């Protein structure tokens, strides 16, 4: 079975065309700057053939047309006919409380996604545009939604309720949802395979540290707590997002700086986090470089980032009652030995003993703790696209013709 995996953002579409049976990526690429006259399509085939096209792509409907055209292209494509696409799997950011797993997309599912627009105003509308474009260009081909929030839907109320009037949860759905669920699920399942242990027997802490960062406490295959909340702004420090702050700070800043709600929202989402503290960059590589050149603010940014991950490992250890394994993933989690070293230093009291040499190794799935470490730590590259393709294939294989 071959699945087209789509991640439709507000001005971009990322895609991978995956042969599910052998888990092979046949082609992948992206369209950036949708809505502008200088949109850029980059496409790479499994054999390394690459192209880059610049042109006007005004909306998601046209973007999907381009994705299909390049997959069908005589010179750069991988299929001769659209019917070779057996299904489409969409990354959908917010499923609200309606989805605790991946689902076949029907008209009623689209309606629920539209009802949830308020919960993810930047992300869900382009997701739906992508779904509607596929309906148009790939009629009859089943589509599935794989939600960033779904894996965390089994969190208990004590983990997802905020200490605000309960009525706000009932009337405006204000609660913690959590995000990056596909990544947390993928790496936690994968670590169980690598440890050769049943997934349901393990207590796992996953750290997805990329431009966006979140952690999850996974107990017997269930995410029982996570660091992101109502929006992806809560929790860890991120590239440009503040993570946990005192909720009265935005109100105070609005009054003091005489700025609007929109301006303070931009400040917390785009000008905070690593870039906010360092004043240099949202990229951990730049932060570490400047820190090594004795830049004080870069050092603070690095330290706040790592301290918060360490703090949540402690919190989740208490929540889980035991840890078997910690997993690092995402651009920072996979690549920065400096961050892992800082986070995992002095954690012997929790049973974590970092092997400094293994921690320096690069690339691939690897364990980085000593052989006598009670708690194992792994680095596992995330692969959300593969999980989306596998989930989609599973749903589509079980379909009756009437459901399509
Ligand atoms: P992601 O969102 O998972 O693609 O992660 C992107 C982020 O990973 C970048 O913004 C960098 O901060 C970080 N990153 C990538 N490579 C490295 C590296 N070698 N060392 C430190 N950070 C890295």
Image (spheres, rainbow, N blue to C red):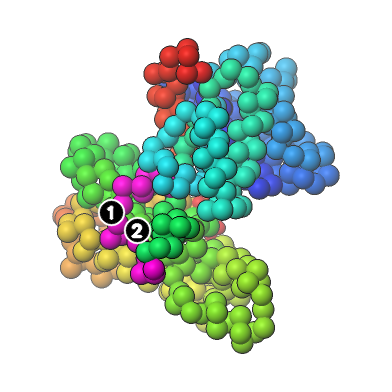
User: Of the numbered discs in the image, which one, if any, rests on residue 160?
Assistant: 2
Q: Marks 2 and 1, how far apart in space?
A: 6 Å
Does residue 57 sit above or below 116 in this rendering? above
Whether 184 is drawn above or below 231: the answer is above
Say the numbered circle drawn on residue 40: none
Q: Is residue 200 left or right of residue 131?
A: left
- Mark 2 Cα within 10 Å, few/some/many (few <14, many 20+)? many
| In the image, residue 50 lies in the stretch drawn in magenta | no
Q: Quadrant of residue 185?
A: top left
Q: Are marks 2 and 1 in contact (CB under 8 Å)?
A: yes
Instruction: Decide if residue 203 is on the left or right side of residue 121.
Output: left
Cβ of disc 2 within 8 Å of ligand 1? no
The secondary structure type at the circle numbered 1 is loop
Which residue is the site of mark 1?
156
Residue 259 appears in the rendering: yes
Identify the residue shown where x is 73% and y is 44%: 34
**Place of residue 299 in the rendered image (x, y in percent of width and height, measured from the top left):** 48, 76
């Amino acid at each position: 079975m071959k699945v087209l995996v789509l991640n439709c953002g507000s001005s971009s579409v990322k895609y991978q065309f995956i042969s599910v049976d052998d888990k092979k990526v046949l082609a992948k690429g992206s369209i950036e700057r949708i809505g502008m006259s200088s949109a850029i399509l980059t496409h790479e085939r499994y054999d390394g053939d690459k192209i880059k096209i610049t042109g006007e792509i005004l909306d998601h409907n046209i973007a999907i047309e381009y994705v299909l055209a390049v997959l069908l292209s005589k010179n750069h494509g991988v299929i001769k006919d659209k019917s070779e696409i057996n299904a489409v799997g969409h990354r959908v950011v917010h499923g609200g409380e309606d989805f605790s797993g991946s689902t076949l997309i029907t008209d009623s599912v689209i309606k629920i996604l539209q009802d949830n627009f308020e919960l993810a105003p930047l992300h869900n509308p382009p997701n739906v545009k992508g779904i509607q474009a596929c309906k148009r260009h790939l009629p009859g081909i089943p589509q599935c939604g794989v939600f960033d929030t779904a894996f965390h839907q089994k969190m208990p109320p004590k983990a997802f309720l905020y200490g605000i009037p309960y009525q706000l949860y009932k009337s405006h759905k204000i609660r913690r949802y959590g995000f990056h669920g596909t990544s947390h699920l993928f790496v936690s399942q994968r670590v169980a395979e690598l440890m050769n242990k049943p997934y349901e027997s393990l207590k796992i802490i996953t750290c997805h540290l990329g431009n966006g960062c979140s952690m999850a406490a996974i107990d017997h295959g269930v995410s029982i707590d996570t660091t992101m909340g109502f929006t992806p702004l809560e929790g860890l420090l991120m590239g440009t997002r503040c993570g946990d702050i005192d909720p009265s700070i935005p109100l105070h800043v609005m009054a003091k700086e005489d700025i609007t709600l929109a301006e303070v929202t931009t400040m917390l989402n785009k000008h905070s986090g690593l870039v906010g503290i360092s004043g240099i960059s949202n990229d951990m590589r730049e932060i570490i470089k400047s820190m090594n050149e004795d830049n004080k603010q870069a050092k603070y940014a690095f330290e706040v980032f790592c301290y918060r991950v360490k703090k949540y490992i402690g919190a989740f250890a208490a929540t889980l009652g035991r840890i078997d394994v910690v997993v690092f993933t995402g651009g920072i989690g996979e690549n920065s030995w400096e961050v892992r070293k800082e986070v995992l230093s002095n954690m012997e009291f929790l049973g974590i003993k970092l092997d400094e040499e293994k921690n320096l190794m690069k690339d691939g799935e690897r364990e980085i703790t000593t052989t006598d470490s009670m708690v194992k730590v792994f680095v596992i590259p995330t692969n959300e696209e593969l999980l989306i393709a596998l989930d989609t294939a599973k749903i589509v294989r079980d379909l009756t013709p009437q459901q399509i």
